[in-house]
Image (cartoon, grey):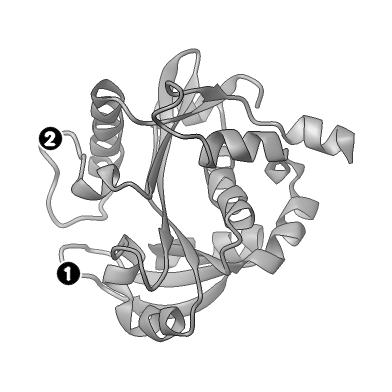
Amino acid sequence: MEAIEYRRITTPEDFEDVGALRLKAFNAKDVYERKFDSPLVEALDFEPDTYVFGLYHADQLVASMRLNMLSANTPPTPAMELFSETLSPLLAQGMVFVDPSRFAIDAEASKIQPALPLLTHRLSTMMTLHKRADYCLCAVKLEHEAYYRRVFGATRLAGPFEPEGMCVQAVLLGISRNNVDYIMSRNPLFHYTETEARLLFDRLEDALPPLCVRPTARYALNAA
């Protein structure tokens, strides 16, 4: 874990690397009906309230995830576009969500660092607590539902259905903020310090260049 660093993606060069990683990861799987032919960078990546993170090992990008806050006052996120009938009434009630998307991992790096998926998803649970969202959403393939139920105690909110342009059944899962303590009790990897959370989610982009932040699970457990 201590060999991994998080970095919020802000520069054109880093976005190019993230787009190339997404391209490689998504084209390797039979999820979309068509293969992508250029680095996968989208307008949503540059929205003010979008958080795109890269995970680096030995200065090499090995994983990435995009995180968005979803409320009645924010632009639509990927989960909202797929499951608007389910989410619209909840947003009207004032609920707030974290929506992770564009989760990509380097296949070769994952053989060396098998905890990469958990280290990446750790960002979404941390953001859910830090931003006090009601739920973290997971719009995933039906085949992955059992994993999210087992590891995160997720519950199904909608689906399955086959989205246009995709060749898989998708479901919408939710991880309650109240469930994150359960996640931490099962896997200490998800612990963090408030300093880490502030560096990742509260830093003003105009004030500092992108920082590399080490996961602090070990220090948080020692402090506890």
Between 123 and 31, the residue placed more toward the observer is 123
Q: Position of residue 69 (x, y in %)?
A: 43, 58
Q: Secondary structure at mark 2?
A: loop
Which label belongs to residue 164? 1
At 32% from the left and 62% from the top, the residue drawn is 77
Packing grade of label 1 (10 A; few <14, some 14-19, many >=20) is few
| Residue 76, placed above or below residue 44 | below
Sequence-wise, the earlier of marks 1 and 2 is 2
Asked whether 95 or 165 is in front, the reply is 95
Query: Residue at point 53% right, 41% down?
Result: 202
Using the image, tell me which numbered label, if any, was put on residue 38: 2
In the rendered image, the vertical position of residue 192 relative to residue 57, given as above or below: below
User: Measured from the top left, where is residue 129 in percent x and y?
Assistant: 64, 56
Is the C-beta separation of discs 1 and 2 under 8 Å? no
Could you say which is closer to the camera, residue 21 or residue 54?
A: 54
At which x and y percent is residue 119? Answer: 58, 38
* Residue 116 seen by the camera: no
45 to the left or right of 117: left
Q: Amino acid at mark 1?
A: Glu
Quadrant in the picture for the N terminus: top right
Image quarter of residue 122: top right
Residue 191 left/right relative to 87: right
Q: Where on the picture, by quarter, is residue 215?
A: top right
**In the image, is 12 to the left or to the right of 130?**
left
Q: The disc labelled 2 sits on which kind of residue?
A: Ser
For the residues labelled 1 and 2, the Cα–Cα distance comes to 20 Å
* Circle 2 residues within 10 Å: few <14, some 14–19, many ≥20: few
Residue 135 placement, left or right of 56: right
Q: What residue appears at the point 29 percent right and 65 percent down from the top-left corner? A: 76
Q: Residue at x 41, y 84 (%)?
A: 92
